Image (cartoon, rainbow, N blue to C red):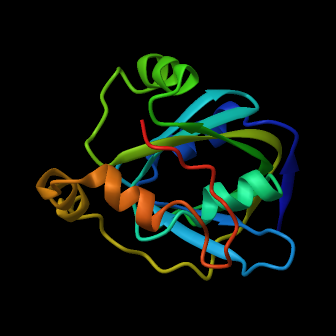
């Protein structure tokens, strides 16, 4: 029931571009495994072996810490509408910190230069392999809308940079995330 690919083929890209939510899994030696849900139309397929997503400020920064410590990332997409399917992308990640030259260039090229107040970094994944599986166990859900909560919260913060310094600099296991505020 599973098929493996060495790149993001056109049919996989089309599937990715239809999804409203994806999940990012990372781990570092001796640390807890992290699994984060993402949405907000943040994912971009940049090539057959390259994807990136605009990562928004959160209560922690496990993904960045684990990428800096280990590099391994799995991203999973599930079909909640239409034919069942699960797609996993396996690879090595990089973090482009907000304000860096690489971040500004990627923001311009992949995200039309649009930077939400809550944006903290861009996560780039060099995709080594992809796998599809049946998805028969995934329930069917109807998409309603994006939640405005995170964007609204970020715009109300008087010191968002201070929040990120306090909550996004190390993982829950004490691993530095490399987060440096612009």
Q: Quadrant of residue 70?
A: bottom right
Q: Is residue 179 visible?
A: yes
The residue positioned 60% from the left and 78% from the top of the image is 172
Residue 152 spot, x, y in % from top left: 14, 57
Left or right of 173? Residue 112 is: left
Q: Quadrant of residue 61?
A: bottom right
Residue 40 spot, x, y in % from top left: 34, 51
Left or right of 127? Residue 168 is: left
Residue 162 spot, x, y in % from top left: 33, 56
The residue positioned 15% from the left and 54% from the top of the image is 158
The residue positioned 18% from the left and 61% from the top of the image is 153
Residue 72 spot, x, y in % from top left: 81, 56
Task: Tell which of 7 and 64 is nearer to you.
Answer: 64
Task: Tell which of 148 and 57 is nearer to you.
Answer: 57
Task: Tell which of 27 and 90 is nearer to you.
Answer: 27
Image quarter (top left, top right, bottom left or bottom right) of the C terminus:
top left
């Amino acid at each position: 029931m599973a098929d493996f690919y060495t790149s993001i083929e056109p049919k996989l890209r089309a599937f990715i571009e239809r999804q409203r939510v994806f999940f990012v899994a990372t781990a570092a030696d001796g640390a807890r495994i992290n699994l984060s849900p993402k949405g907000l139309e943040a994912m971009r397929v940049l090539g057959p072996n390259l994807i990136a997503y605009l990562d928004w400020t959160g209560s922690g920064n496990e993904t960045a810490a684990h990428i800096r410590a280990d590099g391994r990332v799995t991203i999973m997409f599930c079909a909640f509408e239409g034919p069942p399917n699960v797609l996993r992308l396996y690879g090595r990640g990089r973090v482009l910190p907000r304000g860096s030259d690489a971040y500004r260039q990627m923001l311009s090229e992949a995200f039309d230069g649009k930077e939400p107040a809550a944006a903290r970094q861009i996560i780039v994944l060099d995709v080594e392999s992809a796998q599809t599986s049946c998805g028969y166990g995934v329930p069917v859900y109807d998409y309603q809308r994006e939640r405005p909560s995170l964007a609204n919260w970020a715009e109300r913060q008087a010191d968002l940079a201070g929040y990120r310094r306090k909550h996004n600099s190390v993982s829950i296991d004490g691993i530095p995330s490399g987060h440096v505020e612009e």
